[in-house]
């Protein structure tokens, strides 16, 4: 059973960079058929897909964030990471790392971390 | 972006009731539609993918249907543990987008 765990600062100053890492256990970020994703949820609101890093290392980002977001993976540590630059209060959210499974092109997020609340405030 | 609109935004129901939630896409997403359940303070959990395929381990009282732009999630006999918020998600086109959520509350 794969498990994911987010880690990183819970408070970020406006205009600075949000950085989160997801540690994966019980599975490998190099395994085929998976997209390693970040999804966020502002307090009391709905879900927003941020992007993913594919098992090959390629990435795909939400265009609404594309100029500010980057993702990467570290196969030696079995981790993947999110960086979001120039943050504002609108980036305050619970950030979930997650595994998106691809079964012959049928996608679904089948494993989630517990979520990390990141607050943007001075 | 493809907009996903769920209705109703909330529904009050009793244990044993049948509950139907609708999700409408702003353009054709074929059957690239998943449903998630989220309980307060917890991460979402996938229920249905490919519009109608039940995720392993999910009770059979959950079912999904639809294709194109109109989709439905049905809970056939509501159980106490089903009170939660439900989201649809399209994965037909980037960026993948979610509906705004439907909260199922106790009547």
Image (spheres, grey):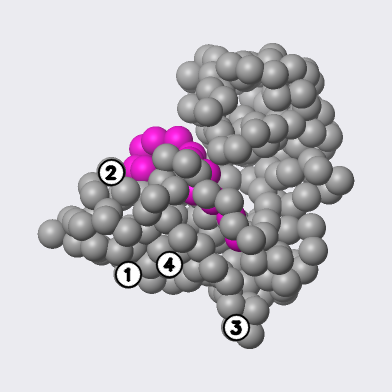
**Which residue is at the front of the view, B51 or A63?**
A63
Q: Residues within 10 Å of mark 1 (few under 14, many from 20)?
A: few
Residue where numbered disc 4 is placed: A20
Q: Position of residue B73 (x, y in %)?
A: 70, 23
Residue at numbered disc 3: A77
| Extreme residue in the left direction | A122
State the separation of the CA atoms marked 1 and 4: 7 Å
* SS for dot 2: helix
Name which of mark 4 and mark 3 comes first in the sequence.
4
First to last magenta residue range? A42-53
B3, A7: nearer the viewer: B3
Residue placed under numbered mark 2 in the picture: A90
Q: Chain of mark 4?
A: A
Q: Position of residue A99 (x, y in %)?
A: 66, 57
Seen at 64% across and 24% down, the residue is B15
Q: Determine whether A1 is above or below B51 in the image.
A: below
**Residue in front for this viewpoint, A99 or A81:** A81
In the rendered view, does A31 fall on the left or right side of A50? right
From the image, state whether disc 1 or disc 2 is nearer to you. Answer: 2
Q: Of label 1 and label 4, which has the lower sequence position?
A: 1
């Amino acid at each position: 059973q794969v498990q994911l765990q987010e880690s990183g600062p819970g408070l970020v100053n406006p205009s600075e960079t949000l950085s989160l890492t997801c540690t994966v256990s019980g599975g490998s970020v190099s395994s085929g058929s998976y997209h390693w994703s970040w999804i966020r949820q502002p307090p009391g609101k709905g879900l927003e897909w941020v992007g993913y890093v594919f098992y090959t290392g390629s990435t795909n980002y939400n265009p609404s964030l594309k100029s500010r977001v980057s993702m990467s993976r570290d196969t030696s540590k079995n981790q993947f990471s999110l960086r979001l630059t120039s943050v504002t209060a609108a980036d305050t959210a619970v950030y979930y790392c997650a595994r998106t499974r691809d079964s012959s092109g049928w996608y679904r997020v089948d494993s989630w971390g517990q979520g990390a609340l990141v607050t943007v405030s001075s | 972006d493809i907009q996903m609109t769920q209705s109703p935004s909330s529904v009050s129901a009793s244990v044993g009731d049948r509950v139907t939630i609708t999700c409408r896409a702003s353009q054709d997403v074929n059957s690239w539609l998943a449903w998630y359940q989220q309980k307060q303070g917890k991460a979402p959990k996938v229920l249905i993918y490919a519009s109608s395929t039940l995720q392993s381990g999910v009770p059979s009282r959950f079912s999904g249907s639809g294709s194109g732009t109109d989709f439905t999630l049905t809970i056939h006999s509501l159980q106490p543990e089903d009170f939660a918020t439900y989201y649809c998600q399209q994965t037909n086109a980037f960026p993948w987008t979610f509906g705004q959520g439907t909260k199922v509350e106790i009547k």
